[in-house]
Structures are given as C-alpha cells and as structure tokens.
Amino acid sequence: MYTNASVPGAGRERAQDAVFGHVLVGLDDTPESLLAAAQAGVLRAPDGRLELLAVAERHLAAHAGMAAPDAEEHVYADTAANLERAKELVDADEAVLAAGRLVPLLRLEAERRGATLIAVGARSHRRLAALALGGHDVEALHDAPCSVLLARPGWGPHRPDRIVVAIDGSPESRAAEETARALAARLGCDLVPAVGLADAAAPDVLRAERENGLVDPRPLLDAVAEAATAASLVVVGRRAPRRGRRADLAERAAYRVRCSVLVVRHHMPAQG
C-alpha cells in the first residue's frame, strides 16, 4: 500500500488537482445530496472553486395526484432547506436555487461555467433497477462534460481512509491513477492500486510496477471491490462517452462497490 511519502510523482499534484479546481455540486431534497456537498468540500483543490446548484424537481410531485400542488411546495421548501444546510457544511463560492430537472441543469451549468467536477449523491439501488427507473447518479454518468463524484456515506466531511484506483493499463486508467496519486498525497491517504490480471492490458508489466498494490487474478472489478471499504474512495477512469455503448467499467464500478466513486473523465486526443 502506498503512503503519502511513497507516492511516485508527488511533485505533480498541482497539475493533477485540475480535476478538483472547479467543483459543481448538485443538490435536491434528499440527504444523499448533502453528502455530495460534504465530500466535494474535502476534495476541492486548495485554491479551487466550489458552487452549489440546488434544483427543486417539482415535476416529481405529479405522482401525488390531487395532492400535487402541496407536494410541489414541499419539494421546493425541502430543496431550499438542503441548500442552507449545504452552505453550513462547505464554504461555497456561489449557491443557486432553481426549479427544473437536476441532471440536465447540472450538465448545462457545468459546460457554461467550465466545471471540472460534478458531485451528486448516490442512491441505494441496484444497477438494473436504476437503469429502468432512473436516478441522479446514473444520469450524471451519461454524457457528463467533466469528471463525476458519486458520493456515498463513509467519510464525508472527513478524508477517506484510503483511495483505491482501478488499473488496467488503458489510457483512461493511467489518467485516473495520476489523479488518485496526487489526491492521496494532498489528503495524506493511503493509495491502493488495484490490478485485475484477468482483464489487464499488460499483466506482467502491471504486476512488476505495483508490487505494493493489490494484484488479483480475477477481473478488475473484483480487485477493486476487495480493496475498498465503506470509508474508501474508488477512482476509475472513463473516456468520453459513446452513445449506444454498453455499460463501461466506470458505470459498473459505481454499482459494484459500496463506497464513494470518483469517475475521472479522460479526453482522448483528436485524431488527425
């Protein structure tokens, strides 16, 4: 297990902290979104910007039938109350209360404001049910313009007990590892590189370079799940999404592990 003192390339933390330079937190009327605010406050770069976007999803009140008007007011009031609680949890640079649909507004605002990280609370559901019924954590992963934090209980507003990064030799996993190493150095956390030899791009090289990591003969998701605790942060890389593509490692990891997940968006260089 790598400690803060033994993290290779620790001099590059500043560059890799770019992921945490401009954080946009999505809030609704649920306690999970408050957890996203607390953990985003921990991850934000020392000179980074953090903004709170609270969205009252009044359309959800339609399920209340005749009581829909009262339900709409409750949704708005509860969302406004959550925004005030979030402002007490973190020192936000800006806080906005709006009405509409949270994830579409998050995407629009992330692009408009140049956010480098979106933070949302993860709901407790299985993957198939979530895909069928929807959920902010699922939606945020699809077509996100930047990296995404899916926050679960375990360590906010304190640092995680360890940072587990998924390694498979791909360009996106290398980007995730650089970010994870820099974050571990800044927060003073143990870093655990998890390698699944069953689907690693270059097993021999990966095994040789990470003797102190967790090398598992099984697939990568098994290795990550083995290394993570409820108080961990799992870091995975993801390429720019492709429409119609089946669930990738980042999405599957979000449902497999029971801790917070940081999905690092890896931008592939343009083809000539």
Image: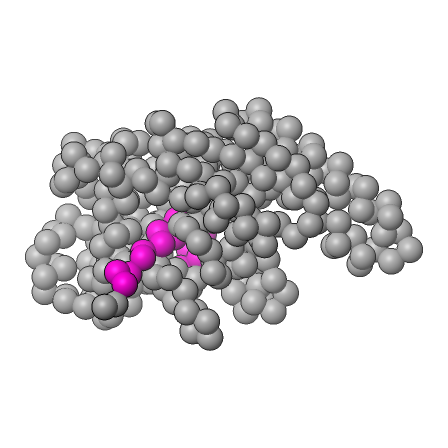
- Residue 42 lies, in percent from the top left, at 41, 32
- Outermost residue on the right side: it is 66
Q: Can residue 221 be spotted in the picture?
A: yes
Viewer-closest of 154 and 262: 262
User: From the image, which quarter does the N terminus lie in?
Assistant: top left
Residue 23 drawn above or below residue 59: above
Task: Count how many numbered circles sit on residues in the image.
Answer: 0
Decide if residue 129 is on the left or right side of residue 4.
right
Q: For the point 69% across and 50% down, which residue is it?
A: 100
Q: Can residue 260 be spotted in the picture?
A: no
- Residue 249 lies, in percent from the top left, at 36, 64
The colour scheme used here is one colour
Residue 254 image-quadrant placement: bottom left
Residue 27 image-quadrant placement: top right
User: From the image, which quarter does the C terminus lie in?
Assistant: bottom left
Q: For the point 41% across and 64% down, which residue is it?
A: 241
Q: Does the magenta stretch include residue 212?
A: no
- Residue 171 lies, in percent from the top left, at 23, 60
Residue 86 image-quadrant placement: top right
- Residue 177 lies, in percent from the top left, at 24, 50
Decide if residue 46 is on the left or right side of residue 120.
left
Decide if residue 168 is on the left or right side of residue 125.
left
Q: For the point 70% across and 34% down, which residue is it?
A: 80
Q: For the point 44% across and 43% down, which residue is it?
A: 115
Residues shaded magenta? 253-270
- Outermost residue on the front side: it is 272
Viewer-closest of 180 and 259: 180
Residue 245 drawn above or below residue 77: below
Viewer-closest of 195 and 13: 13
